[in-house]
Each structure stands twice: as C-alpha cells, then as structure tokens.
Amino acid sequence: MLFNEILTWTTVFTAGFWLAEKLWLKRRRRVRGVPEKPGALVDFFAGLFPVILAVFILRSFIVEPFRIPSGSMIPTLHIGDFVLVNKYQYGLRCPIGYCKPVAIGEPHRGDVVVFRFPKDPSQDFIKRVIGVPGDRIRYVDKTLSINGVPVPLTPDGSTYWNGSFWQIYEETLNGVHHQIMLNPAIPPRDFVGIVPPHKFFVMGDNRDDSDDSRFWGFVPEANLRGRAFLIWMSFNFDTFRPDFSRVGMIIH
C-alpha cells in the first residue's frame, strides 16, 4: 500500500514538471529568446515522467507483483513465491482508496485473490474465494458444502511434512481443480453462515493453518486488489536459492 501511494504521488509530481515544460516554460523561453534547453531540474523530472507514468499504469491497472509471505496457501503457493496479480479482471480501481470507476467483473468460486485485510487494510492477504454473495457456506469437520452441495474432495495420495504430516487432497470448486492440505492432528475450525451482499468468503488451501474468513469474517468487494494468475519467480528460503521449477506455473 505504501508503495502505491509513493508511486501515485511521484507520478503527479513529475507530471507537474512535464506539463509546466510543455505548456508554459518552453513557450516562455521562445518569447524571451533564451536557449531552448530547459534547466537541469525541469529536464530531469519532465524526462522521468513518461517512465513513471508507464510503471504507474502497468502496476495500478494491469498487473502487480506480490510476494507470498506465509504458508496459508500451501500446496498451491509456497513461501517465497512471487506471483502476478491481474488488476483489471474485477474492475479498474483507484490506486489509492477504495473507489472503482469502471466495473468489469466479479470473483468466482475458486479464484485466488489478493485483497486488503479487513482488520488492517495496510496488509495484503491472498486466499481462495470459497463463497460469493448469497452462498450458504458450511465447513464442519473439515468438510465443505456450498448451498447444501458437498464440494468434491479426493485424496491425492501424497503428504507434506513440516514437523508433522499433512494430507493432500484434490478439491473441485466451480470446475476449478486444485490441491488443499489437511492435518488430522489439528482440530477443525467450523463455520456456518451466509455470505452477505458485496462480500466474499475466503479460505487458504492450507486449511488447518490459515487465518481466513472462518476467523475474522468476510472480505468486502471494495477490498479486492485482483486475481493471482502466475508464479513469475520463486525463492527457496531453506536453500537460499531460486526455485526455477516453479517459475511460469499457472495458478489454479
């Protein structure tokens, strides 16, 4: 969030120099008969504006990089993954604040989304959309049902070890096939409720180690930042080396 604010105000600042040069300073130099070249300060900031503007448009309205800071989305996303987030799929949003001047689409069940954490908007969270407005969500004894229909879940046959064994399953949500992870040793965190209008119910794929809607409630539509769709880089903090095997993976 802080970077977005800095980038926005830097764009405005350099735009001021660029406009001043194009609309006023250049004309004034011609009238006075002085050399055409602007001063060093104006030349620097006016020349910087096109580059800053391109970065601003790309990051604010097209794609934005995001680093996975926790293990709540294992096995889909690992700590150290760097993902790209589609910024326009859910509408064009203001780079600062919560306004959405152009509505394009809404999240679907199964989408992996980045959003401002409702309890602390300065933090960005990434989770999977489980319920959309109007859905009846029931997550009891680690079994998920939506609108009375159990979500298909089949054992993957593999396990994950990080001090204890986690069982990996394949879940099918709205036609999206993805893996989730459960730990039989951890008691279930049950949830039953209806998703309110303009809000979404989200959970991590690491179902027994995820701080998500089961604990703090729903994600307002205004908090959405975009849909994660690609891993563009990954760094393994155990070996302190890039993990090129994950680069280019599409996020399902």
Image (cartoon, rainbow, N blue to C red):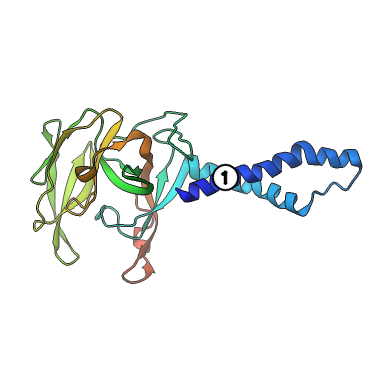
The residue lying furthest to the right in this view is 33
**Disc 1 marks which amino acid?**
Trp
Q: Residue 81's spot in the image, x, y percent? A: 35, 57
Q: Circle 1 is placed at which residue position?
A: 9
Q: Residue 45's spot in the image, x, y percent? A: 68, 50
Judging depth in this view, the residue of 3 and 147 nearest the camera is 3
Secondary structure type for disc 1? helix
Q: Is residue 174 visible?
A: yes
Which residue: 42% across, 28% down? Answer: 103
Which residue: 32% across, 48% down? Answer: 126
Q: Residue 15's spot in the image, x, y percent? A: 65, 42
Please indicate whether residue 44 sits to the left or right of residue 157 in the image: right
Which quadrant does the C terminus fall into?
top left
Q: Residue 22's spot in the image, x, y percent? A: 75, 39
* Neighbours of disc 1 within 10 Å: few (<14), some (14-19), many (20+): few
Judging depth in this view, the residue of 198 and 109 nearest the camera is 198
